[in-house]
Amino acid sequence: MSRDWSRLREELDRGRMWDILMQFPEDLERAWREAEELELEWEEPSKVLVAGMGGSAIGGDLAKEYAYDRARIPVEVVRDFEPPLYADRSTLAFVVSYSGKTEETLSTLSRLLDAGCAIVAVTSGGILGEVAAKKGLPVLEVPAGRPPRTALPYLYLPILVILSKLGVLEFDRGELEEAISMAREARRELFEGGETSRVAEELAERALGKIPLIYSYRPYYSVAYRFKTQINENAKQHAFCAEIPEMCHNEIVGWERGGSKYFPVFLRGREEDPRVRARVEYLVEVLEERGVGYGVVEARGEGRLSNQLSLLYAADVASYYLALLNGVDPTPIELISRMKKRVGGPHW
Ligand code: PA5
């Protein structure tokens, strides 16, 4: 079915999320440059924590998967009021809150300060910005005035750049160049109606009125989770994700009785272990035997970063289109805003 996307955008995208999506390549470049400029005199840490919630935490998930087989120390994400007990003076902690006002993140920050961790603040201001200034913490400033989830380049790339500067992982800057040119190409296709718009539009059309179940594997499972949360927040729709191989030991059984209300989507990238591939092929067979339609999104490029980010960009745009199909403005997240008011602000 051919849709008049520009008319839907005009009518529904009052928060102008489309304009931010179209800046993705420039945001990647700027986030990279600013992270390179940050000077840190620290020793190599013994572990890394990324503390944040929602849109501010996802950069930590991507970094954790990126680092899984490239760093010799653990990289963990903390979505909580408290960091784990092992946080100590040899821990590097990124404290990420776009608004700088999120209660969970600020509570964790206070414990991380008590534990003497080396802290980098990633924020557009708020209380986190104030505390960082008072305590002399290094700050990576995120441009203000947009929904946190659209600031992903500023919440992910700096973590990789800093981990590489501190010797935690080897990160070839050529991967970044590749990811940026991939993003430029994908954006051009969105303007010209090329492959990226075809993939994103088709995903949105097929997810309409269904519950998307997004399946992927390391190092792209973080993108599956991102896709789920983007569908939740942008399209105001339920969606779930599950990781291969683990889901082959539980979730897969749900398909025994079919499931026409679901729309399974596989996110596939260049790094696909043959053991993982065998499982993906088996899952596809299970779905086909039951006549369940599924979608596949293929990553682009050679490097891990380009693969992750090309999937993520397609997923972000698909969730945006799905919002338009659902007749909603992608930007507001009323139930989150009300929750923040209801539970009370941070008590710093
Ligand atoms: O996407 C969103 O707006 C949310 O998921 C927020 O990121 C989340 O509520 C945390 O807020 P903040 O990013 O300001 O710390």
Image (tube, rainbow, N blue to C red):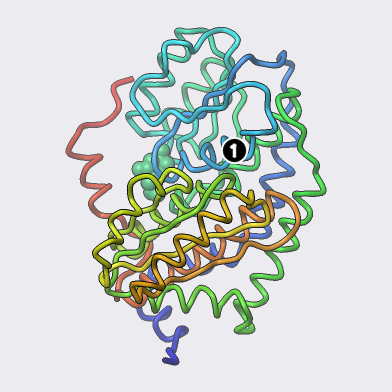
Q: Say if 14 sits above or below 11 in the image.
A: above
Where residue 84 sits, quadrant-wise, is top left
Name the residue: 71% across, 70% down. Answer: 185
Name the residue: 60% across, 76% down. Answer: 190
Query: x, y (%) of residue 108?
Result: 40, 21
Secondary structure of the residue carrying tag 1 is: helix
Q: Say if 96 sits above or below 286 in the image.
A: above
Name the one closer to the observer, 117 or 47.
Answer: 47
What is the residue that sits farthest to the left in this orientation? 342
Name the residue: 67% across, 75% down. Answer: 188
Query: Seen in the image, is 261 located left or right of residue 174?
Result: left
Circle 1 packing at 10 Å, graded few (<14), some (14-19), many (20+), is many
Query: x, y (%) of residue 77?
Result: 48, 30
Look at the numbered disc 1 and say if its residue's Cβ is closer than 8 Å to ligand 1: no
- Residue tagged by mark 1? 63
Where residue 7 sits, quadrant-wise, is bottom left
Q: How many marks?
A: 1
Query: x, y (%) of residue 283?
Result: 44, 60
Query: Seen in the image, is 44 located left or right of residue 68?
Result: right
Identified by mark 1, the residue type is Ala
Name the residue: 34% across, 20% down. Answer: 348
Q: Say if 213 sits above or below 175 in the image.
A: below
Quadrant where the N terminus is found in the figure: bottom left
* Quadrant of the displayed image that contains ligand 1: top left
Where residue 311 sits, quadrant-wise, is bottom right
Q: Say if 4 sits above or below 106 in the image.
A: below
Query: x, y (%) of residue 122?
Result: 54, 34
Name the one closer to the observer, 151 or 248.
Answer: 248
